[in-house]
Amino acid sequence: MNSKLNPYLNFNGNAREAMEFYKSVFGGTMTLSTYKEGGMTQNPAEENKIMHCMLIADNGITLMGADSPEGWEFIVGTNVNISLSGDNSVELTAYFNKLSENGAIQEPLKQAPWGDTFGMLIDKFGIRWMVNISGTKGDK
């Protein structure tokens, strides 16, 4: 099996909601387990928090996520962007539009100086995304 890089996102109690949202964007199959199911908590308030979740889209896009457990510092990161790229303009534009719902578009999808179509956004969960559509010309 080839090595893969899979983003692993941490949330502050809303991992299930966030991962369901990403499933609505990318489709695919999602598996998850709670801290209770994993036997990883003695705190009843944490039993239903997500210990591990994995979403695998039909096209191979994979996202993982979890709720930060009690005692772990939770900081929404500003030093990482998840980048989606390729030449399927229809698919990538749809991802951009869905991810931006109730989020904030930092840079609309438009022709970039390097000739591709590029845009940036922060989704409603505070996750930063970049979308680059290669080989396209003009505004989207």
Image: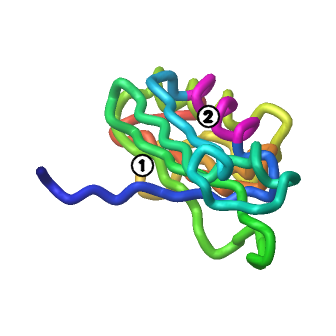
Does residue 64 sit above or below 10 in this rendering?
above
Q: Residue at x 39, y 39 (%)?
A: 61
Residue nearest the observer in this picture, 85 or 140: 85
Left or right side of 59 for 74: right
Q: Alpha carbon of mark 1 to alpha carbon of mark 2: how far?
A: 28 Å
Residue that numbered label 1 is attached to: 115
Does residue 28 sit above or below 38 in this rendering?
above
Residue 96, position as x, y percentages in the image:
61, 35
Amino acid type, residue under disc 1 in the picture: Gly
Residue 136, position as x, y percentages in the image:
40, 35
Which mark, by number, is residue 126?
none
* Location of the C terminus (image quadrant): top right
Dot 1: element: loop
Q: Residue at x 42, y 49 (%)?
A: 115
Residue that numbered label 2 is attached to: 22
Is residue 23 magenta-colored?
A: yes
Q: Bin the neighbour count of mark 2 within 10 Å (Cα to Cα): few under 14, some 14-19, many 20 and up.
A: some
Left or right side of 107 for 26: left
Q: Which residues are magenta?
A: 16-25
Q: Can you tell which quarter of the image residue 43 is in? A: bottom right
Residue 5, position as x, y percentages in the image:
34, 59
